[in-house]
């Protein structure tokens, strides 16, 4: 197994992991956020952004 094969496997695994995170966010988080009104929606994203930045 050469460096190209290893990097290809790593790339596939990384892309799959990111795709899984995005899909999970779309299925779990977004339906809950869609039930909020505009003010609550913005506040929820502000809190989420604050947690991510820490």
Image (cartoon, helix red, strand yellow):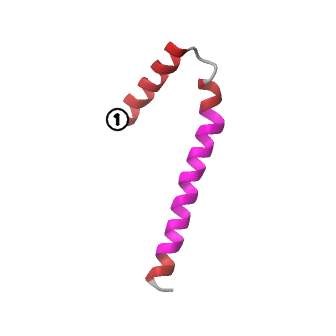
Classify residue 36 as left or right of residue 4: right
Q: Quadrant of the C terminus?
A: top left
Mark 1 lies on a secondary structure that is helix
Residue at 49 percent across and 13 percent down: it is 39
Classify residue 45 as left or right of residue 27: left
* Image vertical order of residue 16 relative to residue 33, above or below: below
- Quadrant of the rendered image containing residue 51: top left
Classify residue 28 as left or right of residue 46: right
Q: Position of residue 25 (x, y in %)?
A: 58, 39
* Image vertical order of residue 20 relative to residue 35, above or below: below
Q: Position of residue 32 (x, y in %)?
A: 63, 25
Q: Position of residue 43 (x, y in %)?
A: 46, 18
Q: Is residue 41 located in the magenta-colored stretch of the structure?
A: no
- Quadrant of the rendered image containing residue 30: top right
Part of the protein shown in magenta: 7-29
Residue at 53 percent across and 15 percent down: it is 38
How many numbered discs sit on the rendered protein? 1
The residue pinned by badge 1 equals 53
Residue at 60 percent across and 50 percent down: it is 20
Which residue reaches farthest front? 38
* Image vertical order of residue 14 relative to residue 42, above or below: below
């Amino acid at each position: 197994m050469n460096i190209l094969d290893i990097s290809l496997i790593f790339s596939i695994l990384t892309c799959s992991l990111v795709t899984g995170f995005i899909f999970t966010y779309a299925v779990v988080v977004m339906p809950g956020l869609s039930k909020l009104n505009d003010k609550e929606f913005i506040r929820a994203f502000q809190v989420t952004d604050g947690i991510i930045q820490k």
